[in-house]
Image: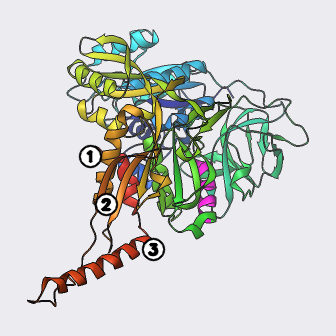
Amino acid sequence: MKHIRNFCIIAHIDHGKSTLADRMLQMTNTITERDFKDQVLDNMDLERERGITIKSHAIQMDYVLEGVPYVLNLIDTPGHVDFSYEVSRSIAACEGALLIVDASQGIEAQTISNLYLALEHDLVIIPVLNKMDLPGAMPDEVSDQIVDLIGCDPGEIIPASGKMGMGVEDILKAIVERIPPPAGNPDAPLQALIFDSIYNAYRGVVAYFRVKHGRIGQGDHVQFMNTKKQYHADEVGILKISQQPRKAISAGDVGYIISGIKDAREVKVGDTITHVDRPTPEAVKGFENVKPMVFAGIYPVDTEDFEDLRSAMEKLQLNDASLTFEPESSAALGFGFRCGFLGMLHMEIVQERLEREFDMTVINTVPNVSYRAYTTRGVMKVVNNPSDLPGPGELDQIEEPYISAQIITKTDYVGAVMKLCLDNRGVVKNQVYLTTDRVELTFEMPLSEIVFDFYDRLKTISRGYASFDYHPTGYRQSNLIKLDILLNGEHVDALSALIHRDNAYDFGKRICSKLRELIPRQQFDIAIQAGIGSKIIARETVKALRKDVTAKCYGGDITRKRKLLEKQKKGKKKMRQVGNVEVPQQAFMAVLKLDS
């Protein structure tokens, strides 16, 4: 065990984690030149297309230092705030972390938030200054920022360049020398923590685990402590570029287990594996349950696909433990699921993965957050969907979740960033100058204001320089109302939203005009209305397609034409009563992009 090192890589998005991991895999000969491709651990098409890491990836490397062989277990993690749950799970399986900071951009919001996660778990931090080859690198300034942040000695910071391969040898050496070997007793009862899992169509669920104590061998009779289910370990092994079977895996190591589990619900990330005949007295302290930030409905386009969508969601949840869902029904869309996501990017990725990996075409409803409604009798009700809101007669007050947001930006953009936050009902709490041209702003604002396109607009006004991180602070009373959208006098519950009273008129007007562009014309007029209770606050009309019924009347009395027009008018009135309005999928998504 003293030759094993478990570590993860943490950094802000686009600071070069995956590129540095590539160089380490090449230097330790874990991957051959023939199999190598850039960002080798990002094996999902979606990750490669977008250039971001979505999943954390575990891989084992063999490294020899001064003639002594070491086993290094690396877990590469995402940098985006929407995937911070992946980071927290990786940290729970490690003893040390590489903190990577871009030498040209300095410390950003997500760097700090991931660092605090690592420090809470008492991980050893190795600071690395990456992208030293860039002409815009500022090694002295950024080194000072790192020293201020973690209080290390300037000599401990390793200068490196993932692209050029500079400093990688020093990093590997520092991992062996600074990170402690895992503590654990190979002879104790088996205790292993599941930190990730995937679904294989042929072999069932594959669970990735970290052994804390004891050892697990092929053919062992094991039990998952949370679900109380028992299995035979058909295959155990280690994770290299591909899975490599082994006879046994003992304390301190990271591996995988295949036991023919076909039902995705039987494996919980954070669960503990132990032996049936010699169980461990206590489960490993897993990680906290995920708190979804954004709620939206996902519905199959064809209602017959509901069960297929359920099994696709269960398989996806194995691979993405931060996704939560429960069944719900909507008058407009039929049966579907109410899903909780960590953010808007997470929601977008889940929808795209359902379409690519499971061939499911789905409709997303307008995202919102979770509110608390109090009735006049003093009963508290959690409202995830505007249709769950109690009627005006029994509603006493509504509370909405608030967050504390940290934004790090250049001083040139402070005014624009402040205006954006104040427009979104934010309150400035603090302003700290990290250096002469970088400032950290702290705001308190409602979570519902950042759900839509706040992050995109922040990036636009700061030309991509601002970085953003947030955490929930609790619930506060707010003046919220339910805004209904009506088509031809019928409520479309999938488009209704809970919104602050001050923004309701503007939002209602914009949503009506957007829908007017997107809803196809019919043979009759379609009235699009936004209403609060029984009061209509905005209206647009999609004009009818009109057939020229008077074409055959040339000359003659005007009453001939009028008679034909009146006949057409009656027909349209009748058609309007029986006609259905088809709402295209873009209309549901357009609500998210009202500003563009």
Choose the circle earlier in sequence order: 2 or 3.
Answer: 2
The residue located at (33%, 71%) in the rendering is: 524
Magenta stretch secondary structure, dominant:
helix
Q: Identify the residue position indicated by label 1 in the image.
A: 596
The residue located at (49%, 22%) in the rendering is: 115
The image position of residue 231, as x and y in percent, is 81, 51
The image position of residue 98, as x and y in percent, is 48, 26
Q: Identify the residue position indicated by label 2 in the image.
A: 518
In the rendered structure, which segment of residues is drawn in magenta? Answer: 308-320
Q: CA distance from mark 2 to mark 1?
A: 14 Å
- Element under label 1? loop
What amino acid is at disc 2? Leu
- Element under label 3? helix
Q: Identify the residue position indicated by label 3 in the image.
A: 578
* Image quadrant in which you'd find residue 502: top left
What amino acid is at disc 1? Ser
Q: Please state which of the two labelled residues, at mark 1 or mark 3, is closer to the viewer.
A: 3
Name the one closer to the observer, 128 or 516. 516
The residue located at (53%, 51%) in the rendering is: 297
